[in-house]
Every structure is written in C-alpha cells, then in structure tokens.
Image (cartoon, rainbow, N blue to C red):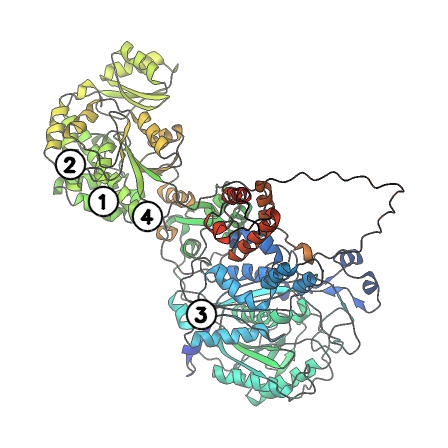
Amino acid sequence: MTTPYPAEDPEPYGSESRDRSLDVAVTGMAGRFPGAPDIATWWRALLRGEVLTTRLDREALLAAGENPAVVDSPDYVPVRGLLADADRFDHELFGISPREAALMDPQQRLMLETAWRALEDAGCDPTREERVTGVYASASSSAYLRAMLTSNTLDAAGVEEALRANEPDYMATRIAYRLGLTGPALTVLTACSSSLVAVHLAVQALLNGECEQAVVVAAAVDFPQLGHVHLPGGILSAAGACRPFDAEADGTLAGSGVAAVVLRRYEDAVDAGCTPHGVLIGSAVNNDGRAKAGYQAPSATGQEAVIRAALTAAGVGADTLGYLEAHATGTRVGDPIEWSAASSVLRELGAAPGRIAVGAVKANIGHLDAASGLVSLIKTLLVVRDGKVPPVTGFRSLNPLLETAGSPLRVRAEGFDWDGDGAPRRAGVSSFGIGGTNAHVVVEQAPAPAGPAPEDEHDGPEHLLVVSAATPDALRASAARLADWLPDHPAVPLADTARTLAAGRAPLPYRATVAGRTRAELAGRLRAAGAARAVGRTAPPVVLLLPGQGSQYPGMARPFADALPGFTAALDGCLARLAEEPAARVRAALFDPAFPAAELERTDLAQLALFCVEYAAATALGGLGVTPVALAGHSLGEFTAAALSGVLDLADALALVTERGRAMDACPPGAMASLSVGEDRARELAAAHGLELAAVNTPESCVLAGPAEAVEALAAALDGSERVRVLRTSHAFHTSLLDPAVPRIEEAAAGVRLGRPAVPYVANATGALLPAGSAVTARSFAEQARGTVRFADGLAAVARAHPDAVCVEAGPGQALSGMAVAAGLTAVPLGGRQGTLEALGALWAAGLPLDPAALTRPGRPAHLPGYPFAGPRLVAPAATVRTAPPPAPAPAPGPAPEADAAPARTPGELVAARWTELLGRDGLTPDADFFDLGGDSLLVVRLAHRLGEDLGVRVPVRSLLTGPTLAEHTALAASLLLAGDPR
C-alpha cells in the first residue's frame, strides 16, 4: 500500500454547484462472506489480496450429497466461495418456531439476521424503528425449495407450507413483518444485477418521499454448497479461480454470501448526527433490449448507457472518478465487452488515460449472483471511506483482448493508498444481469464529521453501557465483543457508544450493564459481567425503600444529581418550599462533601435532608417510568412514604418532618446499637442492660437503644461474642427517651390535612402493609416515632403481597436493601457502593420500564459491533440429502411374528404430538401458548385438521384460537371425544 494515488486539481469538498439535496447516505451496512463472518474481517482480507474461496475435498462433497460419479468426473471443479454456518438461524430472536424456521430458505433466514445487523450499524433499534422504512430484497433462486419439492415426501399441505416459506414473493414482506418496518417492501429479481437494481429503487423511493429510510438486503446461498462441472465455452472456470481482466481468465466461480445496507437522505442523516460510510450521488438502471448477440449475452451499448445515465444523475464528470468496481466475471466474452463499454463512456465524459483503478471482488470470493452488486457496493464504500484500493487478486497480466489505448482504466496487482488531496474520493459500481438489466451507482466519500473535543476519560463523566441478547451465550458474546472493540476505537466518544447502545439496540430479555469513566475500566467490567436472568414480558412490581436517620452523610445528593435525570429539579422543588435559611443549610449538607458530619447528625437537619433526598429520588424515578406498587419507609422514611402515597402533600410533609426533627432533637440524648440477633435474644439483652427494643429489621437483626452509657456497656459486655455495631445517632429513637416529642409530633400532624394513601405503605408500628384508601390518623405519626420499628414484619408483608418485586432503595446507603434481601426480595440500592448510574442500569437489566437512553449523555449514532448471531442448525427433513438405503435382508422363513398393538394415546398425548410436529418444539408445559411458540392462524387451521383426523371428530378452529394453551387444547380434545361429533 505504498504507491500514492495520482490526484488531479484538488477541490474543496462540496465546491461543485450540483444539487446535493438528492444525495443518499449509507448509514449502516452488514454482511457475511466466504471466509469472513463480517465486513471488518472481509475488508482486511481484501486489502491483503486473499483468495477466500474454498477447495472442497471428496469426503465433504459426498457428505453434502454430491453424486460420486459427478465428483470423480475430470470436468468437476470442487471450488466455491463457501459461506460457513449458512444453515444456522437465531429463530428465537425473531419469534419464529423451529419448524417454521427449518422450512425457510437459508437465504431468507440470513437476510433477516443481516438486515437486523445493518440497522444496528445505522444506530437503529431493529424492533422499534419509528421511521417509515422500506425493504428491498433480492436472492438467488431457491435450491432449498427445489430440494424439498423433489424429495417426494411432502403432502399437498406440506408443499403449500414449503412454498410459503421459500418463494421470493415473501422475502421482503417477511423482513418488514418481523422487524416492524412500514415502508414499501419489494422483492427485486433481475438475475446478477438484482441487488444493485434494488439499491437504485430504494434511492428513488427515498427521493420521492415514499420512505424515510430503506434497507437493501440480498443473499446468494446455494443448497448444498458444492463445486461445479466445467462446460467448454461456459461461464464457469475450469481452473477453479476467477481472474477478471487477466490473460488467463477462464470464467467465474459460484460464491455464497449475504449483505445489507441502510440508506437515508443525506441531509436527514446529517441532521440525525449519523456518520455515513459513504454517499450515493447518482444511480441508473436500464436494459440491453435486443442490442446483443443473444438473450444471455452482454451488450456494450446498454452498459455504456447506464454508466452515462448514472453520472448524469450524479451531476459529476468522469474526470472526478478514481475507482470502478466492475461487474468483472472473468469470462472471455464478458470482460472485453465490459472493459470496452466502460472505457468508451468514461473517456467520452472526461476521464484521463489510466485515471481510474479497476476493482473486482469476484476474484476474492466468487460470483455471489443476486447479491453480487450489493457486495460490490459495500467494497466500494470501504474504498472511498478509507482511501485504500485493494489489489485485484490473482491478476498477473492484462487480457490481450482488452483495448488499452487511451483507456481511463487500469488494473493493479498491488493495492495502494488513495489520497484525494482535499477532493472527495468518487467511484462507480457496475452490476449487469443475464437478460440485460444493468445497474450503475456513483459513490462519494462522506465528509468527515465535525468531531468533539478529545476526551479526558479520567476526569470525564461516568458512562452507562447497556447490552442485551436473546440468550445467555449471546449476551456473553456481545459483552466480550464490545469489550474488545472499545480500546481499538478511541476516536469514537464514549458518549456516542453509550447513546447508541441505549437508543439503537433492541432491549432483549438477557441484559447486562456496566458503568465507568474509561475504556479500559468499561472493557474490564464488560468481560467480568456475570450471567443474567431473563426479564419477563411484563415488568416486575417495584417497591421503594426509604431509609431513616443514620444513613445520611455530607454530599449525599451528589451521586443522584449526577446520574438520576429529574432529581435536581425535584430537589429544588422541595427546597423552594422551605424558608431561606434552612433551605441553604440543607442544600449545603446535601452537596458539600466537606460539610461537618457532626452537624448533619443533628436530628433536625438530618431528617429534613433525608426526606428531601428520598422524595426527590422517588419523584425522579417516577419520571423515568418506575412506579411503585408499595412503599416501605424505615422510621423517618415512613413520612416520605406518606408524602409519596398522597397522605401528605409536599408542603405539609416538609413542615411535619421539620417539627418532628426539632421535637426529637430537644429530647434527652441517647445511643443505639445494631445487633445480629433475633428478637427474643434482643429482648433478653435489652432487659439485662437497661435498654429498649427500637427496631426489628430482619429475623436476625435488631436495634437496641437507650442511654449512651448503657449502649457502651452492652458493647463491652458482648466483646465480639455477638456482632454489635454502635450507630451514628444523637438520640435513642423509638424508646421512652423520645416521649417528650410524642405530643408535639401529634399536634403538628393534627394541624395538616391527611389524605388516604393511593399507594400501600408499611406502617412501622404494626409491621402491616397499609392498604390503599385506608384512613390515617395524626396519632399514628406520633406512635411510630415512639414505638418499635417492625420493619422485618413490614418486609414480610411486602414479600407476601409482591413476591417477585424489585425493591429500590431511594436514598443514601444500602442498609434497607440488605434487609429486603433477607426477606427474600430482590433489591437495588440507588446510593450504594456500585454507584447510582450503575444501579439505574441494574433496574433496566431487571426489566423495569425505564428508558436507558435517558441515562446517557447526548451522543451521535456510532458504528458498533452487531448482534452475535449463533442460532442452531436448522434443515427441514424434506430438504435433507438422501442416499439410497442398503437393501433390506431377506426375511427368515416361517410365519411372520405378530406385531404388538400400539397402545392408544390420550387426547393430551395426541395434542402434544401435533404441537411438536407443527411447531418443532418439545418439552411442552400445560401453560405453553401456541402463538407465543411461533404459531399463526394458518398453523391453527392445520392443527384443527390434524387433530380431527386423529380424534375422528370435527375440531372448531375458533375454539383453538380462543383457548390457545396446551392445557386448553387438551381439554377441548377431551370434550370433543365425549361429545362424539363425527367429522
């Protein structure tokens, strides 16, 4: 890659007067190719000039079903562009049953996966694309369908199913259906030029306003993937190598692959912040008509005309082109005609001799038939994007039949760098189909986006990366691929990466999230991400945990303000309802880590500060879509719960908390100690040391409180025999030392309007879950300040009411989360050691309905690693290659033994067997749903027919539709047998 590319007069990007409103950006692309599972791997191989076709050995050919006589023929060429794992399909991701997936042509299965990955590359969530998106699909003739139809194993219904799963009429509409895309969905078939014609049609649809975005996808996968028999004078190579424009070229090779691009109007793409792979500035399609020697012969006239039309549409001269990706089949007839046509028209339109380098990807991978034009386009986009021209693999000397005098074209055996010297790199792509439909596209290098300032990762903000997949293995693979990608792409801002993962990826059932500031930190955490549990179809219920005094610390609001959207506004709303002096004091305590901790331990300040943080955090969570079904506040937290549930309005709650804090602060001082003991043992210790039981937090954790000297004596007496921890408090809350505060609290509560709770919450004094609509008295607020906090009972009540709840600790610390876990609940502390941002990510990973994009900073769509498809191998039995079975041994003389009569099957066994047959699933449970497992209305009709045959009764389709579970179908079958309604 050392030879510099010759450049003519440089021109600033976009200096021409042509109309750029007709440009179309390629915002996403994806593909799988012979010898390469993705575009990045393939591009590196092309730059190295590698031949990616495979020479198949005899055993592999015979195992694939090739006839031994054909394999052993001297004219047999055992070479092709082989696509690995072409029979695999991630059917679960698309909600397709195994049986339906097995019936589908592998080409159409691969097109679904590749369209998904191209949309991801464009920064689009394939399952929630709101733009009107068209689908333009092309594929080669279905050898898979032919294999099934010629197997002689299908009945009439089976033939109909096979046709519906394989015929080209359904390939574009199936993608549109499975991905929810609402623009035009067209199948485009013009033989070898199909996919580049599809690109032209998609461009026209975008410019005509028929869609806002278009996916163009194409596949060419033979079944099985074998070599070929060389016929003298035919287009297939005798040597097993495709060598376009070379003196020794003797034909092409078959190849298998799949490719897709995503297109948008250039102005729309730029407005959305996309970084295009390249820009399509002109395209054209025509047909040779009768201007050729025969139907299958190419025509120089038609090829010239289509190139001229595309350049005219682009509004540029041939003198601005530097590269041409040729159709380039390497055939004796095709190459000279193509060379002559391209040379003539490009010279006429201003291209200087030797100006335009010729590329020929078929030399690397073979001829991908209907997908070849799209594959050539992707290669050309990479050439103009990266400024690197790969060698024409296998080229040694120019075919003497090519006219080189004055030709703008040149073929290079070595790759080289293409320096545009400020002018945009431009190239052409040709694709010509048997039958004469020709296509040509003009491609331009996209302008470099205005990049952000270089990141200082260590001093920068935290970023949340979210990853999801349909299976645990795919989740691990996705996390690992992203971890490997991050250090190698420092030019992509972490904000762009985080935003794309959050807004441009499908939220799938298995999820993982990590937070960090640097690429290395994030990559390490991605590699360490553990296995996840699948989230359900419905979000789990949420219970908010609201801590009490003792959890406070200076600066405790900062983690929430940095990571929780809406928190600061909600907190400001609280502080605005306080007088100026206490509001300033609370704000300083909440945001200044240097605020005196001893001052914050004062009851009047601590309780007010905690209430404000908890209320603001809960309000912000509600703004993200996290709505609780219950609230569990510990001591002071019960007041926050009362405010959030509607018993107290915010102003009254702040006034009541302020008076509660003052009243308690005026009480005699005391101390509190937490012990890892049960309630009975705690009462024994309390009696022995002159203390009182202040709280029962879990079955094995209690708090004793009383005079400070008594607490110190308890700690000294236990001396490590039982775990004891003295708490950071100034008073013995929930003991008789607080008796002077009780009448003041009750008086303050009596002076405010008390509503009825809209959300149930835990009453500390009783440990009961107060139902919505209950009456709340002023006395209850006083009693809870004095009585034992029965939090363990409250959490047990929550667990009984909502056993699958996710408890979110909406305040500083994580003490209540540990108590919830002890009660058998799942808990996520927002202010715990893991950090608020990662905690919010954990809520998304647990299936809560919050939008992860709301947790990211502004960013542009980035080209990130796509979904790691790795589905099972799926081949329909009717498509399986069969060999003749060995002759059966002659029966022994004598009478044949009597066969044992097969036992009659129950209705349940019959129904389950038919489900397995039609859906391809076993291990069925009674609550399995026919439609959730991939069934549809047509399969229900078949099910009714098959069950009718089994049972000898008429099975109503409507009943199968209205009761879709296995148990309901079984009960229906049993009832029909009892009724005896004959067919």
Q: Do callouts 2 and 4 mark residues in contact (Cβ within 8 Å)? A: no
Question: x and y percent of residue 449 in the render?
Answer: 42, 67
Residue 754 circle label: 2
Q: Residues within 10 Å of mark 3 (few under 14, many from 20)?
A: many
Which residue is the site of mark 1?
Answer: 571
Which of the two discs, 4 and 3, sits closer to the camera? Answer: 4
Crowding around mark 1 (Cα neighbors within 10 Å: few <14, some 14 to 19, many 20+) is many
Disc with the residue nearer the chain's start (1 vs 3) = 3
Is residue 931 positioned above or below 717 on the image?
A: below
Q: How many marks?
A: 4
Image-based side of 600 in relation to 43, left or right: left
- Mark 2 Cα shell of 10 Å, populated few (<14), some (14-19), many (≥20): some
Label disc, if present, on residue 264 of the rendered structure: 3
Going from N to C along the chain, the mark reached first, 2 or 4, is 4
Residue 744: quadrant of the picture: top left
Compared to 219, does 207 lie above or below? below
Q: Amino acid at mark 2?
A: Leu
**Looking at the image, is mark 4 or mark 1 earlier in the sequence?**
1
Q: Position of residue 678 (x, y in %)?
A: 36, 18
C-alpha span from label 1 to label 3: 42 Å
At a point 42% along the width and 58% down the height, the residue shown is 128
On screen, residue 353 versus residue 401, left or right, reads left
Check disc 1 and report its element: helix, strand or loop.
helix
Q: Is residue 498 visible?
A: yes
Amino acid carrying mark 4 in the image: Gly
